[in-house]
Image: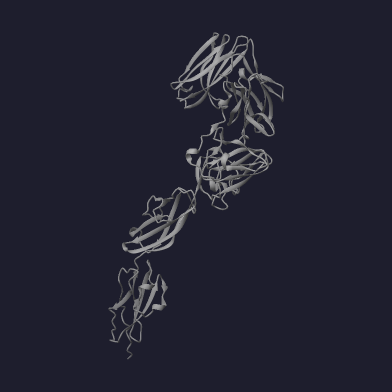
Amino acid sequence: MVIRNTPPTAPAVDVTPDRPRTDDDLRVSVSGSEDADGDPISYSYRWYRGGGHEAAFDDLTTVPASVTSPGDTWRCVVTPTDGADAGAPGADEVSVRGVRIVAGPAGSPDPAASGGAVRMSVEIAGCPDADVRYEWSARDGAGDPAGSFDDATSARPTWTAPEVTRAQRYEIAVTVRCDDDTVVASASFQHRVLPAVRTRVRRGWSMPAVGLPAAAGATFADLLGPGLESVVVWDARRQRYQHLTPSAVFEHAGRGLWARANAAAEAAIPTETPGEIAVAVAPGWNLLANPFPHALDLEADAVAQDAGRLMLPAFHWNGSTYELLRIVPPGCSFWIVATYEGTVTLRSTEMPSALASQPASLARPSAEAGSGTFIQIATETEGCVDADTWIGTTGDGTAIHTPKPPARPGGAASYLDAGGGIGHAHSLLPAGAEQTWRLHVVSPPGSEVTLRIVDTSHLDGQAAVWLRDLATGRRVDLRHAPGYTFAAREGARQFELSLGRREGLVQVMAMSARPAGDGARISFTLSAPAAVTVDIMNVAGRTVRQLVTDRECAGGMQALTWNGRSDAGTRAPRGTYLVRVRAGAATGDTAHGLAPVVVR
């Protein structure tokens, strides 16, 4: 008869404490194993952490706290033996309570813009989401709180950086608590905040500036937003535009640009701020930019070489017209004329905001013209109106000539008496002088261009504004015609403008349009009986309301009222409108009058 050995039964294993912290040793105890043969039982111990065998602790009943970490899972497998055979093993495991930071803390973007939003983040392990609590803080070099958090108790709060005028570092710290205040992890890092150039990109065309970005290799799209469609810079040597893609890398601080976007956007760009930047210029127009996060006083902070000078003021496109600037806001590009080839040094001198001046409009000659006569001429193509061309006379005997920068990319524009590459927006001559102007019109080849007078309210009844097309020899009186239309070709189209008299024909005189309630009160005088049509147009020349159509009127003063409603009966938006009067005499002679009015 053979007597077989019976192995011991599986033991009950207990690893304690049941919910250990990182300062607790792990201890294992065994019970319940029995040997049917009455043989003595011994045990072997195998320790595992997260599935990996920790051989250094085999056959030990204690794992010291110094080797445990928050979130660890420790498992002890105990196998009984009676010296002959091993029995079935028993096991127990525990998870170490606590929290540890496995990634971060960090902030993005880094560096941050002055006053900008920074997305904070930290990743932890070892604590269930329901039991974890976060505490974020930010302090400056003196230890004082800095900026603000939208939710300092979340894992990913947004920190609003302080406003700064020079580079600063802030200590960002996070404390993570798990279950109770005895289980804590904390960490901190330094985050840099730089002055910011705040710039605005309009829907359509605008002239932004991006400063000197801290992000090396940043593209125009990175800096100005995903809605950017195209970028255009200016080749000052060749006096022409150069087209770039939004993915091109921005390289030239101090160089200006045009941007076309499919949506408006605002950007705060962290900017390195050197004391000065040298920018190359060439004779003629130069497109520069304010590279600093504060206003730039061109008279004080733009230093030309001794060999030449800069012509002030500068010009900035406000979305519809050019404005004259001496003080350039941050985030703006601007046109300026140089009379030499070399460099201009732009110096960073922070200016109190109280000194920042309001831009002056280019759309009307300055008050220096006294009581002179102003005639506004518009150049129109599809999607573009240049109404910044004025001719006329001055009442004080002076001549006034205001330069006009190049047309926006793809746009149309008119220039008076262009010479040496510099055309003018305003050309006012002393009364009594020969009143003749050369008009240069530029527009994309193939486009249809219309020249017309916007406002005839400053002309007397006998005055005529003669336009002669030097390409065809055709001559028309713009004052008494709806406009002159031609097809643009490559290069500028040349015209001659002159003031004269128109005798013996029907005329629209003393025309005025004044705001009244939601609309306008309109008056004019006819020199003879005529059939009258009166239209209200928007600034693009589209008819909003036709007040009268071919109404027979006697000669003399006429008065009409517009109630501010369109032909569809809806309220016309606030803004500037043009009142156009067309008068036709029985003889076939026609006359026109135009006057602007602002609806409030």
Give x and y (percent) for residue 437. 67, 24
Looking at this view, is 484 or 135 the one in front? 135
Would residue 571 appear left or right of 250 to someone viewing this image? left
Quarter containing the C terminus: top left
- The colour style of the image is one colour
Q: Compared to 270, does 30 lie above or below?
A: below
**Residue appearing at x 54%, y 12% in the figure:** 525
Which residue is located at x 36 percent, y 57 percent?
Answer: 134
Residue 460 visible in the displayed image: yes
Q: Is residue 256 visible?
A: no
Q: Which image quadrant is residue 334 in?
A: top right
Residue 573, horizontal then vertical, whole percent: 47, 27
Task: Determine whether 534 is above or below 146 in the image.
Answer: above
Residue 131 in the image: state x and y as whole percent: 33, 59
Placement of the N terminus among the 4 image quadrants:
bottom left
Q: Name the residue nearer the viewer: 104 or 311.
A: 311
Instruction: Count how many numbered circles sit on residues in the image.
Output: 0
Q: Residue furthest front?
A: 306
The residue positioned farthest toward the bottom in the image shown:
1
Residue 300 at x, y percent in the picture: 57, 41
Could you tell whether 78 is left or right of 298 in the image?
Answer: left
When the figure is inspected, residue 118 is found, relative to residue 435, above or below; the finding is: below
Q: Nearer the viewer, residue 106 or 582?
A: 106
